[in-house]
Amino acid sequence: MDHLEKILGDVPFQLICHNYNSWAGKNGFPLRSRGSLQDKISRLGLSRIAVGQWIRSTDVRRLLDISKQTLIKWSDAGLLPVVRVGDTRNHWYYVKRRI
């Protein structure tokens, strides 16, 4: 659980399952489903909210008072490192806090 605690708060929750399972596979631990990781995090009393290196694009837009189009332009110009997380129907965008 040390690895799980280490990545919580720094990695968006949508990446937790992927990140944890990559680590577990390399280190001989069993893979876990998203639901089992959610349950474990709740049982440990840990937060799933990313407060580390990534912030949701909607929060960036609200903090900077910019439109979605402006955020996209900045991202396309390489001014903001943006990552898309999720599948084609359910996805989120995150912006790296430090450039």
Image (tube, rainbow, N blue to C red):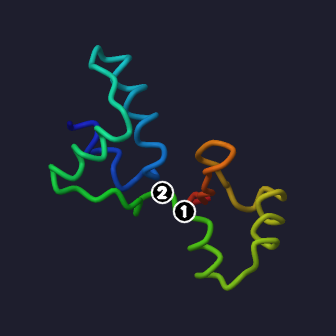
Q: Secondary structure at mark 2?
A: loop
Q: What residue is at 30 percent from the left and 40 percent from the top? A: 37
Which amino acid type corresponds to the residue marked 1 in the rendered image?
Arg
Residue assigned mark 1:
97
Mark 2 surroundings within 10 Å by alpha-carbon count, few (fewer than 14), some (14 through 19), many (20 or more): some
Question: In the rendered view, would you say 61 is above or below 35?
Answer: below
Q: Position of residue 53 (x, y in %)?
A: 48, 57
Which amino acid type corresponds to the residue marked 2 in the rendered image?
Gln
Q: Position of residue 84 (x, y in %)?
A: 65, 49
Q: What residue is at 61 percent from the left and 60 percent from the top? A: 95
Residue 39 is left or right of residue 87, and the answer is left
Q: Using the image as rendered, state which of residue 40 and residue 47 is in the foreground.
A: 40
Q: What residue is at 59 percent from the left and 47 percent from the top? A: 85
Mark 1 surroundings within 10 Å by alpha-carbon count, few (fewer than 14), some (14 through 19), many (20 or more): some
Residue 61 is left or right of residue 71, and the answer is left
Which residue ends up furthest to the bottom in the rendered image?
Answer: 65
Q: Position of residue 9 (x, y in %)?
A: 36, 56
Q: Using the image as rendered, state which of residue 36 and residue 71 is in the foreground.
A: 36
Residue 56 is left or right of residue 88, and the answer is left
Residue assigned mark 2:
53
- Mark positioned earlier in the residue sequence (1 or 2): 2
